Amino acid sequence: MSNKLPQPVEEFKNNYAEVWRAFTELGDRCHEAGPLDEKARRLVKLALAIGGGLEGATHSAVRNALAIGIRPEEIQHVAVLAITTLGFPATIRALTWISDDLKSDGQ
Protein backbone atom coordinates (compact mmCIF):
# COMPACT_ATOMS: atom_id res chain seq x y z
CA MET A 1 0.00 0.00 0.00
CA SER A 2 1.29 3.44 -0.88
CA ASN A 3 2.40 5.88 1.82
CA LYS A 4 1.46 8.73 -0.51
CA LEU A 5 -0.90 11.20 1.10
CA PRO A 6 -4.19 12.10 -0.61
CA GLN A 7 -3.87 15.22 -2.77
CA PRO A 8 -5.81 17.57 -0.43
CA VAL A 9 -3.56 16.53 2.46
CA GLU A 10 -0.43 17.04 0.35
CA GLU A 11 -1.66 20.53 -0.53
CA PHE A 12 -2.30 21.33 3.13
CA LYS A 13 1.15 19.99 4.05
CA ASN A 14 2.78 22.17 1.39
CA ASN A 15 0.75 25.30 2.10
CA TYR A 16 0.94 25.10 5.90
CA ALA A 17 4.24 23.37 6.59
CA GLU A 18 4.61 24.59 10.19
CA VAL A 19 1.07 23.56 11.08
CA TRP A 20 1.66 20.16 9.44
CA ARG A 21 4.86 19.64 11.47
CA ALA A 22 3.05 20.52 14.70
CA PHE A 23 0.15 18.22 13.80
CA THR A 24 2.42 15.25 13.08
CA GLU A 25 4.42 15.96 16.24
CA LEU A 26 1.20 15.91 18.27
CA GLY A 27 0.27 12.57 16.70
CA ASP A 28 3.68 11.14 17.57
CA ARG A 29 3.42 12.34 21.17
CA CYS A 30 -0.08 10.88 21.55
CA HIS A 31 1.14 7.49 20.31
CA GLU A 32 4.01 7.58 22.83
CA ALA A 33 1.84 8.73 25.75
CA GLY A 34 0.49 5.41 26.93
CA PRO A 35 0.96 1.67 27.24
CA LEU A 36 -0.84 0.46 24.11
CA ASP A 37 1.32 -1.31 21.55
CA GLU A 38 1.29 -0.20 17.93
CA LYS A 39 -1.23 -2.80 16.79
CA ALA A 40 -3.69 -1.84 19.52
CA ARG A 41 -3.22 1.87 18.76
CA ARG A 42 -3.87 1.33 15.05
CA LEU A 43 -7.05 -0.66 15.73
CA VAL A 44 -8.27 1.99 18.18
CA LYS A 45 -7.61 4.72 15.60
CA LEU A 46 -9.63 2.71 13.07
CA ALA A 47 -12.50 2.32 15.53
CA LEU A 48 -12.50 6.05 16.26
CA ALA A 49 -12.59 6.88 12.55
CA ILE A 50 -15.44 4.45 11.95
CA GLY A 51 -17.35 5.73 14.98
CA GLY A 52 -16.95 9.29 13.80
CA GLY A 53 -18.19 8.40 10.32
CA LEU A 54 -14.99 9.88 8.90
CA GLU A 55 -14.25 8.39 5.49
CA GLY A 56 -10.81 9.91 4.99
CA ALA A 57 -9.71 8.99 8.50
CA THR A 58 -11.01 5.44 8.02
CA HIS A 59 -9.04 5.06 4.78
CA SER A 60 -5.94 6.42 6.52
CA ALA A 61 -6.40 4.08 9.48
CA VAL A 62 -6.80 1.09 7.17
CA ARG A 63 -3.64 2.01 5.24
CA ASN A 64 -1.70 2.47 8.47
CA ALA A 65 -2.98 -0.82 9.87
CA LEU A 66 -2.03 -2.73 6.72
CA ALA A 67 1.40 -1.08 6.74
CA ILE A 68 2.25 -2.67 10.09
CA GLY A 69 0.91 -6.10 9.16
CA ILE A 70 -2.57 -6.07 10.64
CA ARG A 71 -4.56 -8.66 8.73
CA PRO A 72 -7.60 -7.68 6.63
CA GLU A 73 -9.79 -9.93 8.80
CA GLU A 74 -8.75 -8.00 11.91
CA ILE A 75 -9.52 -4.69 10.22
CA GLN A 76 -12.94 -5.92 9.09
CA HIS A 77 -13.66 -7.23 12.59
CA VAL A 78 -13.37 -3.68 13.95
CA ALA A 79 -16.20 -2.64 11.61
CA VAL A 80 -18.32 -5.65 12.58
CA LEU A 81 -17.95 -4.70 16.25
CA ALA A 82 -19.57 -1.36 15.41
CA ILE A 83 -22.98 -2.98 14.73
CA THR A 84 -24.22 -2.92 18.32
CA THR A 85 -22.94 0.59 19.03
CA LEU A 86 -23.34 2.47 15.74
CA GLY A 87 -25.91 0.38 13.89
CA PHE A 88 -26.00 -1.72 10.76
CA PRO A 89 -25.78 1.15 8.22
CA ALA A 90 -22.62 2.53 9.85
CA THR A 91 -21.06 -0.92 9.83
CA ILE A 92 -21.83 -1.45 6.15
CA ARG A 93 -20.48 2.02 5.38
CA ALA A 94 -17.24 1.18 7.20
CA LEU A 95 -16.93 -2.22 5.53
CA THR A 96 -17.38 -0.52 2.15
CA TRP A 97 -14.56 1.94 2.88
CA ILE A 98 -12.36 -0.88 4.16
CA SER A 99 -13.11 -2.96 1.09
CA ASP A 100 -12.04 -0.07 -1.16
CA ASP A 101 -8.63 0.01 0.54
CA LEU A 102 -8.20 -3.75 0.55
CA LYS A 103 -8.98 -3.90 -3.18
CA SER A 104 -6.50 -1.13 -3.96
CA ASP A 105 -3.91 -3.01 -1.90
CA GLY A 106 -4.58 -6.24 -3.80
CA GLN A 107 -6.07 -8.03 -0.79
Image: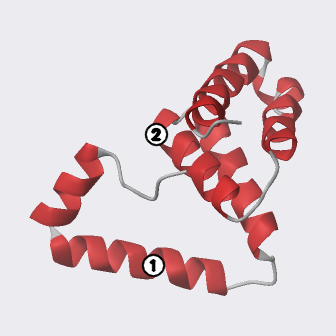
User: In what element is the residue under mark 2?
Assistant: helix
Q: Which of marks 2 and 1 is in front?
A: 2
Give, as a three-letter code, the residue at label 2: Gly
User: According to the image, label 2 marks what residue?
Assistant: 56
Task: Pick out the residue farthest to the front.
Answer: 106
Q: How crowded is mark 1: few (under 14 residues within 10 Å), some or many (20 or more)?
A: few
Residue 44 placed where, x, y %?
Answer: 74, 57
Task: Pick out the residue farthest to the top.
Answer: 89
Q: In this view, does 40 lie to the left or right of 59?
A: right
Q: How crowded is mark 2: few (under 14 residues within 10 Å), some or many (20 or more)?
A: few
User: According to the image, label 1 marks what residue?
Assistant: 26
Point 65% across, 35% down: residue: 102
Residue 100 placed where, x, y %?
Answer: 58, 27
Q: Is residue 57 left or right of residue 18?
A: right
Point 86% across, 29% down: residue: 80
Residue 88 placed where, x, y %?
Answer: 79, 15
How are the colours assigned in the image?
secondary structure
Q: Quadrant of residue 76?
A: top right
Give, as a three-letter code, the residue at label 1: Leu
Label 2 to label 1: alpha-carbon separation: 19 Å
Establish if 56 lies above or below 43: above
Point 71% across, 25% down: residue: 95
